[in-house]
Image (tube, helix red, strand yellow):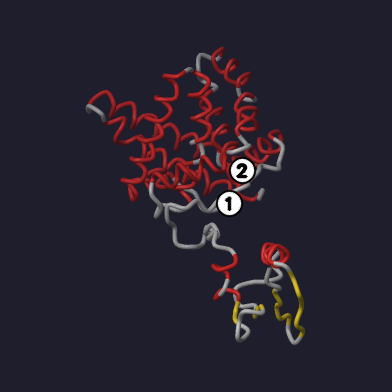
Amino acid sequence: MLNWYYAAGEERKGPFTEEEFLQLVKNGEIHDETLVWNEEMGDWEPYKNVKISIDPTPPLPTPVEEHSEKIPYEALFSRTTNAELMTRARASLQGRWGLSIAVIFVCLIILSVASQWIPFAGVVLSGPMMLGLYIYFLALIRKEEVELSLLFKGFEHFLPAFLTYLLTSIFVFLWTLLFIIPGIVASYSYSMAFFVLADDPSISASSAIQISKMMMKGNKWKFFCLSWRFFGWSILCLLTFGIGFIWLYPYIYASVTHFYEDLKKGS
């Protein structure tokens, strides 16, 4: 077994077994530009020149790298309680309730009218409209400038938005054919796809879906509990002949958006 050494400034550290050496890499003590050496090497070289020979597993790309079919999110967990996420949602909506209601109302009206008058319009328009809706709520909770026109931003990325909606709908339908519970679980797995697409519209629909699945791994139960918190509010809204939903829908969207934002920061 080879013994490894690395340079820390003027100091040379070692020897380390390959296992110990790789652990130092994972801990961040050795990076791509760190000079390393073993008994079989002639000269000291940067770690990036030899890392494939010692660790052939390529690292996952980070979100700032060029996107491919690899998934940049892993081991993310929402650390904030659902009650706190809902409190943050109300704070984000403060002074913006009217605009948020208008955004959702316009979205629903467009989809409803188009579906009644144009065949398959609901399928075609739902993706970009949903993407615009998520773009709006991300801007809202991030305290960016928000306006009604954000709702139509999704049409600037029509194809990935359309495909994301189409694929998630098909996948959820197929899982539901097995039983209702698998369909619900699948819908939770894909629930972050439009948020991912809103954050980076350059990625493909399949990548957005795969990223959502990875982000929701280990977080579906918490998301279910967050959704369940609105059940009682929904009953009350029904008692108001549906009028209460005007305020409930923005509350739900803002809470789910905070869930996504907290999930990203929980790694």
Residue 53 screen position, x and y as percent: 55, 68
123 or 44, nearer to the observer: 44
* Side (left or right) of 77 relative to 200: right
> Which of the two discs, 1 and 2, labels the residue nearer the N terminus?
2
Q: Is residue 84 left or right of residue 116?
A: right
Badge 1 marks a residue whose secondary structure is: loop
| x 65%, y 32%: residue | 222
Q: Residue at x 38, y 49 (%)?
A: 204
Residue 259 x, y percent position in the rendering: 61, 40
- Estimate the x, y position of residue 104 in percent, counting from the top left: 45, 34
Q: Label 1 amino acid?
A: Lys
Numbered disc total: 2
Q: Quadrant of residue 31?
A: bottom right
Q: Quadrant of the N terminus?
A: bottom right
Residue beneath the point at 60% across and 86% down? 42
Q: Is residue 170 left or right of residue 28?
A: left
Residue situated in front as seen by the camera: 243 or 67: 67
Local crowd size for mark 2, using a 10 Å CA cut-off: few (<14), some (14–19), many (≥20): many
Alpha-carbon distance for marks 1 and 2?
Answer: 8 Å
Residue labelled with disc 1: 143
Residue 62 or residue 84, whichever sits in front: 62
Q: Residues within 10 Å of mark 1 (few under 14, many from 20)?
A: few
Mark 2 belongs to which amino acid? Ser
Q: On the rendered structure, is 228 left or right of 99?
A: right
Q: Looking at the image, is 236 positioned above or below residue 175? A: above
Q: Which mark is residue 92?
A: 2
Give x and y (percent) for residue 18: 68, 66
- Quarter where residue 8 is shown: bottom right
> For numbered disc 2, what is the local secondary structure?
helix
Q: Residue at x 52, y 43 (%)?
A: 137
Q: Badges 1 and 2: C-beta atoms under 8 Å apart? A: yes
